[in-house]
């Protein structure tokens, strides 16, 4: 349920975040002490008996089967498993013994790095780096839940449960894009990262500020409000809405309501970005890239142990780019620096320090064109003012992750991050309404200066443990998180406008003059949440139960009016899911989940002037997952129904106000498969049907119309995609790799459903060559050419206004020279 105060004026200041951050830690520490006392005397995890039935098979598949049976995390250098076959393991035994038996005869060893973690080693792993000479060190693969490294198919995730859980045991659809897939497709932005993921449709926005604008299961999310980084919200600054894909290890798309673990989220789901972390094995990579629109880029990725003890690890990821886009005068420049260090001050304690600096320079032209101007305005025409309509961002973040093992069954984890974001945003928008060309080829433009700076504090502390009640085993999670955001923003409009001749653009050289600000204020938001979860296992049954309560306080300070408006929300959300894992790897499941999301706004004074309640969401989902033992793959199918209530709609009686009488329902089907069918061939395929519609709206009064039965803006009816990659490992073509993909986006509507946006299909391709196949001295060097929208098809998405559209990305070439050692 939800409660909220009426909007009111008050002069009280905003509580500083320090006290609540401290309270968060103290409360969880108290719970930790109590839990630790109850957990004493538990049997060591390594020595507990587990029943195994793992046949002889390719070693990577056997390790996956071991992970599913034990819940362990296992890491190993990627190439040492190629061509190896495991020894069959059968019967009840401790996991450590089973892992050693699995490796018998392979020539590999195992090093146990924790009670439920291990690393496989080959003979080269014991050789000091200085003794390797010209030998090529091995890449690292992490088949755990927070990194998939060189693996193509992820089988575990932390994002869906905040606990390392096999995907097959999670009663929710989660799509994972691994680092290997990001590299194969040469992903450069958010849209490309999720382009082959079912159920999510992203608006391509070449030349614009680049804010992620997407719908997930039929519900639109703009900016980073639905995006998380390393399990914490990516930010609150809606103008600082980008990230660097080179700095990521994986992308998890969690479908459906997830408030039970994360607090306020869209009912469609969320996207979690996992950044690169320090590595136990030496890692060195340099990549040079060039391509369309004058692109010049260099990227480096270094990591490994600081000393021979392995108690200190490091990672440094950096990227510099100077590039244009298909839009004239629209740059795509960036600088990304991300150092991190992992320290092990004690045997059972690990802390990873993470920092990043991100600087962007892009265009801030709206680029919305009238649909009637398609074919008149070229896909390269800049609808802004060069040098004056800019989007410049500086983002600094510092954080840490602390893991402490209390005993064999219980552990403490804490994530924290501070972010400062500063955005210089001068926005070029259409100065005509409705948006139309004047005299057939003139486009009027105005500028709006809207700088914004923010500070964000995030902390999440939880305890995780294992226990048993008779034949039922429990994986328990209890935590408390807190987020605090403060930001200031102003807006002022230019006193003059510019009329651009779209057939022959001429731009002014004098600076625009601006009026006094019409917006000048500060926003503060604090969210405190307490959550619990229990994953119960009985035989092959898995029951997941969770609940969370949130308190949210938001304050809007209007410096121009001299007023302060404070709103308070609270909500309880939950989840229940039941699944059954058959011996053959098939796992049907059913689940129920809820969500909430605060919204700003007040009712008309004639309706009492009360502040809005949060929107709420409910999802019912059924599905089946399949993870085979004989080959590396993961397949899933799901059906869902999501209903969002308390949606804001125009007030039919009082102009300029809104009411919360709307409701949106989305019913859909999703199919997805990822597989490494052989050592040479990998495949991805997906399809989604999205039946989203407005089910409640204001009644038609006077000239107003009801939207009941209409589709939400920009939500495609279906999406489909397929990507295949083949690498030649022998013969005359040894070292060559080929990739080919197609992605289809179905028809969608504008907000009034008066115009249909046509469907489109785009083809992507990749060619790679391992230069080491030519000569051993070239080992570690590779060349790649990636082409997106190979056929250079013109397509577009719904624009910001009903009668406008945004051009999509034209064909783009990317050539990459990379060297690993």
Image (cartoon, rainbow, N blue to C red):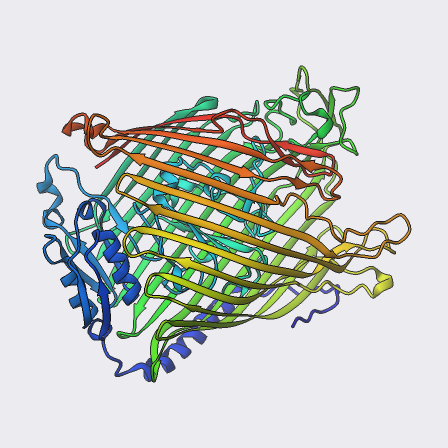
612 left or right of 174 in image = right
Screen quadrant of the N terminus: bottom right
Quarter containing the C terminus: top left
Identify whether 619 is placed above or below 143: below
Residue occupying image coordinates x 74% and y 35%: 803
Q: Which residue is most to the right?
A: 702
Residue 378 horizontal/vertical position (percent): 63, 21
Above or below, 138 against 607 in this view is: above
Residue 501 or 49: which is nearer the viewer?
49
Residue at the front extreme, as displayed: 584
Q: Is residue 387 above or below residue 397?
A: above
Please identify the quarter of the rendering in which residue 101 is found.
Answer: bottom left
Q: Position of residue 537 (x, y in %)?
A: 37, 74
Work out whether 741 lies above or below 467.
Answer: above
Q: Is residue 419 left or right of residue 698?
A: left
Q: Is residue 324 left or right of residue 34?
A: right
Q: Nearer the viewer, residue 256 or 679?
A: 679
Q: Position of residue 428 (x, y in %)?
A: 66, 32
Q: Is residue 191 left or right of residue 779?
A: right
Q: Is residue 272 visible?
A: yes
- Tell me how many marks there are: 0
Q: Which quadrant of the view contains residue 772?
A: top left
Which residue is the extreme one toward the top?
504
């Amino acid at each position: 349920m939800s409660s909220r105060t009426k909007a009111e004026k008050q002069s009280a200041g905003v509580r500083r975040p320090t006290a609540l951050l401290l309270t968060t830690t103290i409360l969880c520490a108290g719970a930790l002490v109590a839990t630790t006392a109850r957990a004493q005397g538990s049997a060591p995890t390594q020595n507990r008996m587990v029943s195994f039935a793992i046949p002889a098979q390719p070693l990577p598949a056997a390790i996956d089967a071991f992970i599913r049976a034990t819940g362990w995390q296992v890491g190993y250098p990627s190439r040492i498993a190629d061509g190896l076959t495991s020894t069959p393991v059968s019967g009840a035994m401790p996991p450590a013994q089973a892992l050693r038996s699995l490796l018998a005869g392979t020539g590999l060893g195992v090093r146990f790095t924790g009670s439920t973690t291990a690393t496989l080693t080959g003979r080269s792993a014991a050789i000091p780096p200085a003794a390797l000479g010209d030998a090529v060190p091995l890449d690292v693969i992490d088949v755990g839940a927070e990194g998939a490294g060189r693996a193509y198919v992820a089988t575990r995730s932390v994002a869906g449960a905040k606990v390392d859980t096999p995907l097959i045991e999670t009663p929710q659809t989660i799509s994972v894009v691994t680092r290997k897939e990001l590299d194969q497709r040469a992903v450069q932005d958010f849209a490309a990262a999720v382009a082959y993921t079912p159920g999510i449709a992203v608006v391509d926005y070449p030349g614009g500020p680049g804010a992620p604008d997407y719908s997930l299961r039929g519900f639109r999310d703009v900016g980073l409000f639905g995006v998380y980084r390393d399990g914490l919200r990516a930010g609150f600054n809606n103008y600082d809405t980008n990230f660097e894909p080179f700095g990521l290890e994986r992308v998890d798309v969690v479908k459906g309501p997830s408030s039970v673990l994360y607090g306020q989220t869209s009912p469609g789901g969320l996207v979690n970005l996992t950044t690169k972390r320090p590595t136990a094995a030496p890692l060195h990579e340099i990549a040079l890239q060039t391509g369309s629109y004058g692109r010049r880029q260099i990227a480096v990725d270094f990591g490994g142990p600081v000393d021979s003890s392995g108690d200190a690890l490091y990672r440094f990821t950096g990227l510099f780019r100077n590039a244009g886009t298909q839009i004239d005068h629209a740059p795509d420049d960036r600088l990304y620096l991300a150092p991190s260090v992992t320290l092990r001050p004690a045997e059972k304690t690990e802390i990873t320090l993470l920092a990043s600096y991100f600087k962007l320079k892009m265009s801030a032209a709206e680029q919305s064109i009238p649909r009637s101007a398609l074919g008149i305005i070229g896909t390269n025409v800049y609808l802004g003012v060069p040098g004056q309509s800019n989007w410049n961002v500086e983002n600094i973040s510092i954080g840490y992750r602390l893991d402490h093992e209390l005993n064999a069954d219980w552990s403490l984890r804490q994530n924290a991050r501070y972010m400062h974001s500063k955005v210089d945003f001068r926005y070029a928008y259409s100065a005509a309404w409705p948006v139309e060309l004047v005299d057939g080829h003139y486009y009027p433009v105005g500028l709006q200066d809207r700088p914004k700076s923010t500070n964000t504090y995030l902390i999440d502390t939880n305890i995780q443990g294992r226990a048993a009640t008779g034949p039922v085993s429990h994986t328990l999670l209890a935590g408390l998180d807190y987020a605090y955001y403060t930001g200031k923003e102003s807006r002022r409009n230019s006193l003059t406008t510019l009329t651009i001749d779209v057939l022959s653009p001429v731009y002014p050289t004098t600076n625009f003059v601006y009026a006094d600000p019409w917006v000048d204020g500060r926003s503060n938001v604090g969210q405190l949440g307490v959550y619990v979860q229990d994953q119960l296992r009985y035989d092959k049954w898995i029951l997941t139960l969770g609940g969370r309560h949130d308190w949210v306080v938001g304050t809007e300070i209007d410096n121009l009016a001299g007023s302060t408006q404070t709103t308070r929300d609270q909500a309880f959300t939950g989840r229940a899911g039941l699944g059954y894992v058959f011996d053959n790897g098939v796992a049907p499941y059913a689940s129920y989940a809820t969500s909430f999301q605060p919204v700003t706004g007040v009712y008309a004074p004639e309706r009492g002037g009360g502040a809005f309640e949060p929107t709420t969401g409910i999802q019912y989902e059924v599905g089946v997952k399949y993870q085979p033992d004989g080959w590396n793959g993961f397949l899933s199918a799901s059906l869902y129904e999501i209903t969002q209530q308390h949606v804001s709609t125009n007030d039919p009686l009082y102009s300029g106000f809104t009411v919360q009488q709307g409701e949106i329902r989305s019913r859909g089907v999703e199919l997805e498969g990822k597989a490494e069918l052989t050592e040479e061939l990998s495949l991805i395929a997906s399809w989604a049907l999205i039946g989203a519609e407005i089910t409640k709206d204001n009644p038609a009064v006077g000239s107003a119309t009801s939207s009941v039965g209409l589709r939400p803006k920009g939500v495609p009816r279906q999406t489909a995609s397929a990507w295949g990659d083949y690498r030649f490992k022998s013969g005359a073509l040894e070292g060559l790799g080929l990739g080919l993909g197609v992605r289809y986006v179905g028809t969608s509507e504008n907000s009034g459903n008066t115009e249909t946006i046509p469907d489109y299909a785009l083809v992507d391709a990749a060619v790679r060559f391992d230069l080491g196949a030519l000569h051993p001295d070239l080992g570690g060097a590779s060349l790649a050419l990636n082409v997106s929208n190979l056929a250079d098809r013109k397509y577009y998405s719904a624009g910001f206004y009903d009668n406008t559209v945004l051009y999509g990305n034209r064909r783009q070439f990317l050539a990459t020279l990379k060297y690993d050692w």
